[in-house]
Image: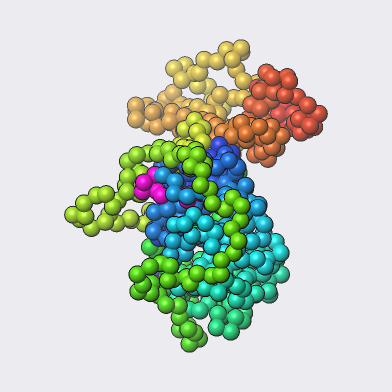
Amino acid sequence: MTAPTTKRAWKLQEFVAHGANVNCLALGHKTGRVMVTGGDDRKVNLWTVGKPNCIMSLSGHTSPVEAVRFGNAEEMVVAGSMSGALKLWDLEQAKIIRTLTGHKANIRCLDFHPYGDFVASGSLDTNVKLWDIRRKGCIFTYKGHSNGVNCLRFSPDGRWVASASEDMTVKIWDLAAGKLLVDLKQHSGAVNSIEFHPSEYLLASGSSDRSIRFWELEKFQCVDCTDYDNNAIRSVVFHPDGACIFGGSTELLKVYGWEPSRCFDSVNMSWGKVADMAIAQTQLIGASINQTTVSTFVLDLTRVAPLGQVPSTPLPLSSSGRKNFTPDRPSTTSTKQQIPKPAEEPEEPGSILDDATEDNSSVADVKDLKEYEEVFKPNHKLALSPPRKMDPFPAPKEDDVSVANQMKSLAPFQPAVGSTKPSGSETYRGESRIPPQYRAPSLPPQQPAAPHQSYQTPSNKPAGLDPADFMPPQQPSTMAIGDYDALGQMSKGHNSMSALLAARNKNLQIVRAMWSSGNVRTALESAIQMQDNSVIVDVLNVLNDKPHLWSLDVAALVLPHINSCMSSKHER
């Protein structure tokens, strides 16, 4: 049998998402094709997965945005900030719906109720709050965690909300009774991600202790635990049919089964700080954060066990006999009947913002009108034909390492506009560059023919740099060469130089974004960690042009690296 010629996992894109560090992101779990990000620049930006430009930028927060979440139909977005405020946006109308306050510290996680007009928020203040979108207020505050809340999920039937915390526990709260239902305590590290099984009474929790635990929700017991991974589990998601669960760590994506615990497959993703995963038809979409950049990844599920044929592992049928969640929304005339109203708690000062000026300061700036109307306003079009089918992302070839795939399309830096990078390039944790030593191959030294000599005066010749490294190989004068071949040879050197300059420009944009935020030391440390002398030389030129930027801290950082620059091929 012929081996597949395309990759089963690949990087789809990488782009600068904000003008400062990105703190959070979320994928739309209905389609897996939209993404929302929040950053230190206090903006919320919306993207189409696989496309380079920001669709819409939402502003109005007065502090960095630290949690974002799409509504279940991807028609709304809620964002929480460092100040403890939530802002809810209607994406179809491109306007703010509510601003809600009440938390006393950073908001860390959010989730929408599956049926009613409710949102839950978890905070560094250790509390979980349930908000009624319509009445603009907090219904109830659930208290019990001893450290910040990292993740929230409503149960599929909408009766419970589960919270995962830095205190190494998972708590399940009964929304109708307004009280703690159970406290699950067997993890030995912070719990980062939780997910309800799509149908069975089962909850999975991924932790910094490098394991995923499975809890059955009738007797509230841990029924299984995976083997320990090499790194903390950052994100978990069940397959829609409930056959397996995907666990994402810094390096790997693993596919697990339970009862008995087993690892069906393991895929090296090298995606770094993976923040969210979603299933889109036959593909899994993952997204990760690194400083100001966001990267998206694709996994072909048809080539992953137990869903595909490589490698093949028999999937035992579940015999748990476990109770199932009610899959459909109960037939009621009011969403209030979904959650019986708990005992009223005293209204917290400032939990309702009646002052219209707060919402008036919130602006939705549509950056790409055509994409916005296609993604968020499809209901305005006449339904004369079936909805447009979203095809899976095409997989790159397995051994495609051409220079063209290493080049990146990068526009001048703009906080709301990103730039994609071809999927075949080598990247790790958002630091993407082509090694400086990559050059077009050159033949042994020969006497070049006169027409091919490159004019270079001593005054503009870079010290120690041979221009021949970037020129096409010289042909013996006795050989005839056609125009097509000559252009092909010339393009090799041009493509190599273009790729080097594009990589250098990309690294400089990352440094510039940090520098612009006012943190010069962090920008210098980032430039040094790139291990690219050309970037260090450019930064040194800026420091020499502006002597007032020099300080003892700056000197201590850059002086050890000046010697390596002096011995390199770059101009002094």
Pick whichever, 547 or 35, lies toward us. 35
Query: What residue sits 66% from the left and 23% below the top?
Result: 542
Q: Is 411 placed above or below 89 here?
A: above
Instruction: Using the rendered view, name the quadrant where residue 140 is placed.
Output: bottom right
Pick whichever, 438 or 315, lies toward us. 315
Query: What residue sits 72% from the left and 24% below the top?
Result: 549
The residue segment tinted magenta is 87-94
Position of the C terminus by quadrant: top right
Q: Position of residue 431 (x, y in %)?
A: 59, 43
Position of the N terminus by quadrant: bottom left
Q: Is residue 166 left or right of residue 38?
A: right
Q: Position of residue 174 (x, y in %)?
A: 55, 73
Q: Is residue 273 visible?
A: no
Q: Is residue 258 visible?
A: yes
Which color mode does the image show? rainbow
Q: Position of residue 513 (x, y in %)?
A: 59, 34
Instruction: Using the rendered view, name the quadrant where residue 22 is placed.
Output: top right
Q: Is 257 placed above or below 266 here?
A: below
Q: Position of residue 536 (x, y in %)?
A: 67, 30
Query: What residue sits 34% from the left and 28% below the top?
Result: 482
Q: Residue furthest left?
A: 384
Instruction: Using the rendered view, name the quadrant where residue 266 is placed.
Output: bottom right
Query: What residue sits 51% from the left and 32% below the top?
Result: 413
Pick whichever, 526 or 236, lies toward us. 236
Q: Does the magenta portion include 183?
A: no
Pick whichever, 180 or 91, lies toward us. 180
Q: Is residue 205 left or right of residue 29?
A: right
